[in-house]
Image (spheres, rainbow, N blue to C red):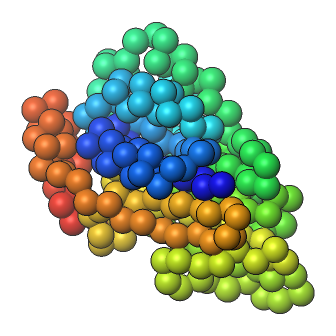
Amino acid sequence: MRIGIFSDVHSNLEALVAVLSFFREKEVQWLLCCGDVVGYGPNPEKCIELVRISRAKVVAGNHDWAVAGRIGIGSFNSIAAQAVRWTQTRLKEQEISYLRNLPLTEDVGPFHLVHSAPSSPSLWEYITTLEDAEEEMGSFIADICFIGHTHIPFAVERISGRQARIITGSSFELRPDAKYLINVGSVGQPRNGDPRACCLVIDWDERRAEFHRLKYDFTITQKKITTAGLPAFLAERLATGT
Ligand code: ZN
């Protein structure tokens, strides 16, 4: 069985279509999404629709709940806050209600799903270092915890009795005697210097995970951002993945 995991779509329809098509090609059976379906990008309504149709299990990101009015935008920078307000004007009550009802966490078989830190999902903290990840390892009981939020793919493995380590390389074995914390990167606004849409595919029978980077035509998204009157920086960063 194959599982496709993705996060931080951020209303980028072109990147989302690339990832969902890739999952279809790979004959992925389960789809899991670590939140931030909306925010920043120009197609919130279409992205919500496609994610719903995909039947992915989805948890809430801070942008999803901010757009839904479930959390304030006091901690958002001015560009993010501007995009939240713009997104609110684009969505119908039914779409707002979908975002409002997204849960903070989900458990699907051996997988735990959360947008930010599993120890405190409602605080929207960023896990950026091995030390951060190691501290979080005790806060979920599942074999594998998938997260998003930083837009930077990152996998940490802790074999029982040993110290946690960062996994290098895009393809890796999932050992039955280990726990994993995996940031699946961002579909719609990557920030690690690679502009391609990021996602993860797990082959559960083979116990292998692989990060994938998918090219899409970000110039279409950039034009839509400009036409929508969203901040220019949101268009520019799609070209550099920063
Ligand atoms: Zn995000």
Instruction: Give the image location of residue 110, x and y in percent.
Output: 79, 55
Q: Quick check: 118 above or below 178?
A: above
Split into 4 quadrants, where in the image is the N terminus? bottom right
Please say if 217 is above or below 192: above
- Where residue 141 sits in the image (x, y, percent)? 86, 59
Which of the two residues, 179 or 61, is positioned nearer the viewer here? 179
Residue nearest the observer in this picture, 109 or 92: 109
Which quadrant of the view contains residue 202? bottom right
Q: Residue 24 location in percent, x, y?
A: 44, 46
Residue 6 or 85: which is nearer the viewer?
6
Residue furthest bottom as drawn: 162
The answer to whether one can see residue 222 in this image is yes
Residue at x 84%, y 67% (from the top left corner): 138
Left or right of residue 107, residue 197 in this image? left
Q: Is residue 238 left or right of residue 214?
A: left
Q: Is residue 76 visible to the viewer in this orientation of the structure?
A: no
- In this rendering, is residue 166 above or below 138? below
Extreme residue toward the right, this view: 161
**Residue at image location 50% in from the left, 83% down from the top:** 169
Q: From the image, which quarter does the C terminus lie in?
A: bottom left
- Identity of the residue drawn at 63% across and 23% down: 101
Question: In the rendered picture of this protein, how many numbered marks are placed on residues?
Answer: 0
Q: Residue at x 78, y 88 (%)?
A: 163
The answer to whether 138 is drawn above or below residue 160 in the figure is above
Query: Relative to 140, is 191 on the left or the right?
Result: left
